[in-house]
Amino acid sequence: MEKAKIKASQLFILVVLFEMGSAILLGLGVSAKQDAWLATLFGLAGGLLLFLVYYQLYKYYPSLPFTSYVQKITGKWIGRLLGFLYVIYFINMSTRVLRDFGELLTNTVYVSTPLIVINSLMMLIIIYAINKGIEVIARVGELFFGAIYLMALTGILLILFSGLLHPENLQPVLEYGWKPVFRTFIRETLTFPFGEMVVFTMLLPLLNNHKKVKLACMGGMILAGINVSLTIAINIATLGVDLYERSNFPLLTTIGKIQLANFIERLDVFFMLYLMIGCFFKISVFFYAAVVGATDLFQFKNHQKLTFPIGLMILLASVTIASNYAEHIEEGLRVVPVYVQWPFQIIIPTILLIIAFFRNRKKKATSSP
């Protein structure tokens, strides 16, 4: 594993940027209609409970990444297999986020540019960043964190002053009862984006102050969850439920409606800037976890040797994973949560925690006089 150290504040920023990532761009919780913001808050609560599972595993093995301590919990061969499957999972998630990024740009701004060109440019930047290491990525996060919040505050103020907000679009609350909210929570908002915190099981050993892991990660999740929920509420209040459901990128549609004093308009550039920053950090964290995991499993001395091959794999998969954007979204909503997210984010970590609990209890019992 890379010999690097990051501060708690840098971890906090990475968590916020990672969690917001592509979640703020897409129509999250759309099946809960005007209660999508509420389903997101439930997802945040469930995600915090899930993180406690990851955190407890980390406490048992504070100096090891997930791919190492899974071998200690389940044995060498089963552990190596599980570690390899998680590397594939991280690659798959990088691929999906890269496809989101490319599709948005090719569908809105660069309509005549091939998807492979857009994705290649982003991938080259990320490969360079991964080669430089997690410390550099964390420092870049510190630079962009303030810029993102300045853009967000500016956007909210412009929406307010433009008179676009219609709070009645959020009513009636729970029109269809709790069932759609809980269904959306289970199928969508629990696993995306909050359950994706499982990727940080590969990064937590890099923190220079282990006592601040819980505060940094859970604090980052809470801030990101509130930001995403607030963005969803603003989108629905501005667009209405019907347009929110039909829009591929609701935030872009909302920003496109801003018109103030007959000259402040066409502010899509704010959205595009956030898109590039948010997707850069989300892809980078998943990509870095895949590279570090593969380096650990295959006993490479330097993670940089695997950066380009895995990056090329992610790039090629991003353009072949689906034939069009509709298929990509359908797969992301129907297949990925049930067959990918639930096993890797919830089922396997919970089973590992149970086994680790009994293993460590036995060690304490045998070591005590």
Image (cartoon, rainbow, N blue to C red):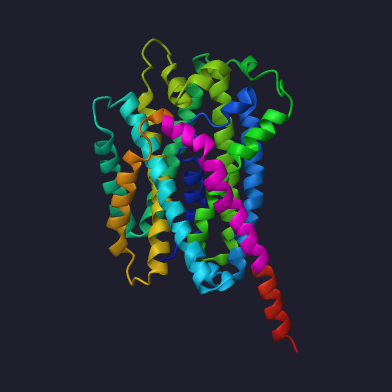
The location of residue 264, given as percent across then percent down, is 38, 17
Determine whether, in the image, residue 298 is placed left or right of residue 13. Answer: left
Residue 90 forms part of the magenta stretch: no
Nearest the camera: 89 or 243?
89
The residue at the point 46 percent across, 32 percent down is: 329
Residue 192 visible at all: no
Residue 229 visible at all: yes
**Residue 359 sits in quarter:** bottom right
The residue at the point 25 percent across, 32 percent down is: 114
Nearest the camera: 336 or 104?
336
Quick one: quadrant of the N terminus?
Answer: bottom left
The residue at the point 38 percent across, 22 percent down is: 267
Q: Main secondary structure of the magenta part?
A: helix
Q: Residue furthest bottom?
A: 369
Quick one: quadrant of the C terminus?
Answer: bottom right
Note whether 350 is above or below 145 in the view shown. below
Q: Residue furthest top?
A: 262
The location of residue 286, given as percent across then percent down, is 43, 51
**Residue 29 sits in quarter:** top right
The location of residue 275, given as percent across then percent down, is 39, 35
Note whether 225 is above or below 262 in the view shown. below
Residue 341 forms part of the magenta stretch: yes
The location of residue 324, given as percent across then percent down, is 36, 30
**Residues rendered magenta in the picture:** 327-355
The residue at the point 59 percent across, 49 percent down is: 219
